[in-house]
Image (tube, helix red, strand yellow):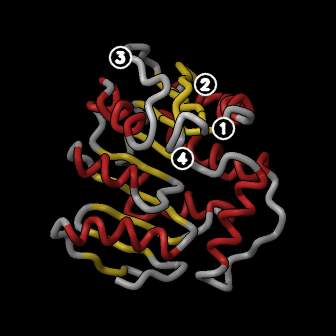
Amino acid sequence: MNVEYGDLIEVGPHIFLCGDVMEGDILALLAYVNIDEKIDMIYSDPPWSSANCRYWRTIAKKTCESIETWPVSFDIFLSHITHPISCIAKRINVMWIEASMKEYNKVVEAFNSYDTIREYLPFSGEWTICYGSPKRPNKLLRFSQTNTIKDDPTYLSGEAPTDWAFKQDDSQLSETVFDFCIGQGMTARKAYKYNKTVYGLELNPKRLKKTIEFFENKGFKARKIS
């Protein structure tokens, strides 16, 4: 299936929007058929800094000219994530966020600035993992009311940290997972592996197409609904 910016796509029970965090599209996706009432887990690897935000917007603009590449403040970017998450925090079992070694404290502070997140999704752990190789360490952050953890993911690399997160008790209890920067579909692949429904937002049509194709190759039918 060809994917264009603005497309809302159903693939079996899974729903994806090719849209923009900075344009309020997390709330737009959550509003569709009351998705906000179904999500009980979040896993996402969003851009890690202002420079990283600009990089991914520049890459996306090569696919879609209508995407703006104005200078992006990381603080403002985080606010467009944390506010909608605060609206659904009460029903979330666990939230996993990947962040940079340099900026992860800012990410924690941004989420903790909301009373509902502090109450229902308190920050409960951080681990140093590897983004592809040991030469590129980053942080895996956990927000949950429970503290039970199986094993230690420190220095796991590639998709292994995500797989580890999906095996934890509060993740296992969850039936649906939301990724607001779903990219080429690592969260989607784990959702499929662990029999969960996934909802996702992605700015870049080419990257979202990879996620759609993954499910199509598993036998799911994709259709555009807008």
Going from N to C along the chain, the mark reached first, 4 or 1, is 4
Amino acid carrying label 1: it is Ser
The residue indicated by pointer 2 is: 118
Going from N to C along the chain, the mark reached first, 4 or 3, is 4
Element at badge 3?
Answer: loop
Going from N to C along the chain, the mark reached first, 2 or 4, is 4
Q: CA distance from mark 4 to mark 1?
A: 10 Å
| Nearer to me, 84 or 54 | 54
The residue indicated by pointer 3 is: 151
Tell me where residue 226 sits by quadrant.
bottom left
Residue drawn where x is 65% and y is 71% of the image: 59
Element at badge 2?
Answer: helix
Q: Mark 2 and mark 1 in contact (Cβ < 8 Å)?
A: no
Q: CA distance from mark 4 to mark 3?
A: 21 Å
Tell me where residue 123 sits by quadrant.
top right
Going from N to C along the chain, the mark reached first, 1 or 2, is 1
